[in-house]
Amino acid sequence: MRKVSGDNIEVYSMEQKTEDGLWKKYRKTRDPKIRDMFIIQYAPLVKYVAGKVAVGMPSNVEFEDLVSFGTFGLLDAIEKFEPDKNVKFKTYAVTRIRGAIFDELRSIDWVPRSIRQKTREVEDAIGTLEARLGRTANDQEIAGALGMSEDEYLKTMMKISGASIISIHEVWYSGDENDKASIADSIESPSSLNPEVIAERDEVRRVIVEAINELPDNEKKILVLYYFEDLTLKEIGKVLGVTESRVSQLHTKAITRLRARLKNSRRGIV
């Protein structure tokens, strides 16, 4: 890795210093030359994450806007990254970039009100139904609870798919910054947090893991492949032997079901 910055040329090379060494130096000195080098090196990562988020978004959401939002996440990641942890910067940065994009999308309220309302209706129906059944509800049962035919239900899931293309790290969110948990929280050093906050976040993560484990196998596979193996919906379709639209539909169902279960858990219903 080599970068020449400004008139006062200073070259950092990977042959001379490892990247870990540069991170440690940056943590100590906050040298803007090192920061700029990291920004340039990881800028393609912002476009990659923005590209994944763009899948399923409505036409009024511009790719370049997503890149712009994500850049703030990259800058935040560079400032907060701790090289002494056993976490690669890329892994940490992806979470920060994705989080910054969705934070901004939430702030501009890009989801049409009708879609947001329908999403809530489906989540509530699933949550109530599965709490009563004590098991995972199938499509026919959910459609019946919504007063729809199964075909109408599946079409509805496709309509709200854009609203569900959210990071799994954001599913535990109720509008209050203190009411969400993310993998970023797990990666960050807890040294600045008091024990009560740490315990609360650990409990939230435990509930999320349990909820994921209770999903149907095909929905669970898609979440793992999309969020943790970092595959696109198209790539997942090839792996599973189904169309990209079917993957999008299953992804929406998984997220909707997951959010419903987390709501129930918060309320003490399940």
Image: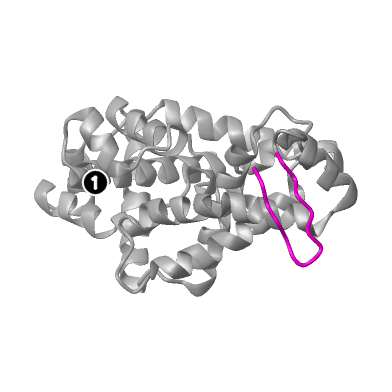
Q: Residue at x 44, y 45 (%)?
A: 259
Quadrant where the N terminus is found in the figure: top right
Q: Residue at x 68, y 42 (%)?
A: 185
| Residue 175 visible in the displayed image | no
Above or below, comparing residue 247 to residue 125 in the picture: above
Q: Is residue 186 magenta?
A: no
- Between residues 109 and 44, which one lies in front from this camera angle? 44
Looking at this rendering, what residue extends furthest in the right direction? 28
How has the structure been colored for display? Answer: one colour
Q: Residue at x 37, y 65 (%)?
A: 116
* Residue under label 1: 249
Q: Magenta stretch: dominant SS?
A: loop
Above or below, comparing residue 93 to residue 138 in the picture: below
Mark 1 surroundings: few (<14), some (14-19) or many (≥20) residues within 10 A: many
Q: Give the x, y percent position of residue 238.
A: 21, 33
| Residue 210 visible in the displayed image | yes
Quadrant for residue 195, please give it.
top right
Span highlighted in magenta in the image: 1-13
- The amino acid type found where label 1 is placed reads Gln
Q: Is residue 4 magenta?
A: yes
- Between residues 126 and 62, which one lies in front from this camera angle? 62
Q: Give the x, y percent position of residue 215.
A: 36, 30
With 67 as the anchor, is 152 left or right in this view?
Answer: left
With 83 as the anchor, is 270 left or right in this view?
Answer: left
Quadrant for residue 76, please give it.
bottom right
